[in-house]
Amino acid sequence: MAGGGPVKALVVVAHGSRRESSNDEVRALATRMHTRSGMKYDLVNCGFLELAEPSIPGGVQQAIDAGATQVHIYPYFLSAGRHVVEDIPAEIEIARVANPDVAIEILDYLGAAEGLADFIFSQIGNRRLR
Amino acid sequence: MAGGGPVKALVVVAHGSRRESSNDEVRALATRMHTRSGMKYDLVNCGFLELAEPSIPGGVQQAIDAGATQVHIYPYFLSAGRHVVEDIPAEIEIARVANPDVAIEILDYLGAAEGLADFIFSQIGNRRLR
């Protein structure tokens, strides 16, 4: 976090599950993304809509408390259901009101990714069948 | 489907939603995957665990009725919850019993993909912010 440029954070936002192992999968993804983020983000963490911690505003706040001045929200969801269309923007609005000087932007959700079909094919070749 | 080799099908298996637009996203993905499957699969279709048609055994049967002799099941899920660990294998068992001569295998689910972190970063660069 040296220099005078913006400190960029990515917050991976997931639904949250009663199964802690599912939440841990999201946390592990965020950790793996942090490791591989290269120059793109200084921080990567996560936030959950429900059933797990931190909450979405909580995850954003963690990033800001760690120095982030620019926050991207990545909805780790497969379809544009109510959570993506309504609930996540509402949670982000809470974070924006609490941090008016921080640029907080919501990226497209995973399921909308143009390259998803090709990615799936690329991964199928690597997978063990069971 | 010329030649004497196996006819390969991929069935994209999703949860299913009350929002038909979410189910249509899965159907559109399957169509896109069919278009891009190249030599890998002769057919790509989908199946839903609940709330949408076709069911998982129904989607497998459609593929077999269209000539598939080898079927891969792709769980379009982000975490190894009950649906991935128990429910999908149980549905596939129904399809296997009904089609003992067809090789039906379950691939790893989307969230388990090794390259997912890198894929997400590659897509973020392409995304419009909102």
Image (spheres, coloured by chain):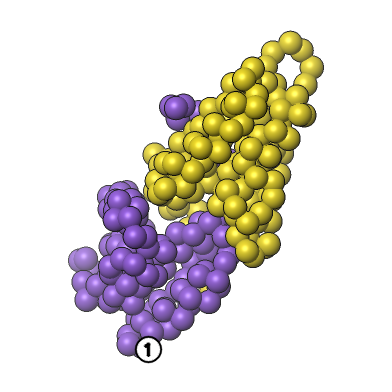
Chain colours: A purple, B yellow
Is any part of residue A72 visible from this angle? no
Looking at the rendered structure, the secondary structure element under dot 1 is: helix
A97 on left or right of A2: right
- Residue B74: x, y in percent? 55, 38
Residue A128 lies in quadrant: top left
B25 on left or right of A60: right
- Residue A12: x, y in percent? 38, 62
Chain designation of label 1: A
Q: Residue at x 52, y 69 (%)?
A: A84
Viewer-nearest residue: B108 or B39: B108
- Residue B35: x, y in percent? 71, 39
Q: Which residue is mark 1?
A: A97
Q: Residue at x 43, y 83 (%)?
A: A93
Residue A62 lies in quadrant: bottom left
Q: Residue at x 21, y 71 (%)?
A: A66
Is any part of residue B95 visible from this angle? yes
Amino acid found under the numbered disc labelled 1: Val
Tell me: residue A127, above or below residue A116: above
The quadrant the N terminus of chain A occupies is bottom left
